[in-house]
Amino acid sequence: MPSITFKLMGVFSDTGERQILVDSEATLGEIKELVKKEFKIVPNAVITFLHAGKRYGREEDHIPFKRIPIDPRTEKITVIVSNPNWR
């Protein structure tokens, strides 16, 4: 399982980045749930991933992560949260 760096948009300190082990067979929707838990984002918030100029919203939640072309050693996935309600 690769370790992917996720960066929370709008947070400029180290607290805005997390390394998360990702199962490449998991869907983007399942990985978004992992990201919500790791960053302690409320369950009803909407997560969008941004990578290499492409947005991965709710419409792409069924896509397996292995179909996202990413080099985990050098690239990050930006996490956009809409309607954030932090705990």
Image (cartoon, grey):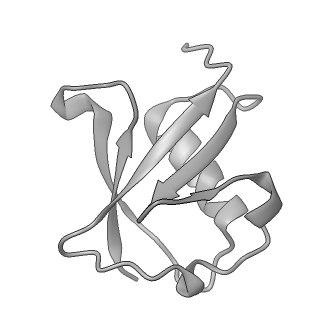
Task: Indicate the quadrant where residue 72 lies.
Answer: bottom left
Task: Indicate the quadrant where residue 12 lies.
Answer: top left
* Residue depicted at x 78% and y 53%: 58
Question: Residue 71: where, in percent of width, then height?
Answer: 29, 80
Task: Say above or below: 1 vs 41.
Answer: below
Total marks drawn?
Answer: 0
Quadrant the N terminus occupies: bottom left
Task: Indicate the quadrant where residue 43 lies.
Answer: top right
Is 56 on the left or on the right of 74, as rendered? Answer: right
Question: Residue 61: where, in percent of width, then height?
Answer: 75, 63
Quadrant the C terminus occupies: top right
Is 37 on the left or on the right of 60, as rendered? Answer: left
Is 79 on the left or on the right of 14, as rendered? Answer: right
Task: Say above or below: 2 vs 57.
Answer: below
Task: Say above or below: 42 vs 5.
Answer: above
* Frontmost residue, 26 versus 59: 59
Question: Residue 86: where, in percent of width, then height?
Answer: 55, 14
* Residue depicted at x 72% and y 76%: 63
Question: Residue 75: where, in percent of width, then height?
Answer: 26, 67
* Residue depicted at x 64% and y 41%: 47
* Frontmost residue, 83 versus 85: 83
* Residue depicted at x 62% and y 14%: 85
Report the residue that reaches farthest toward the front. 53
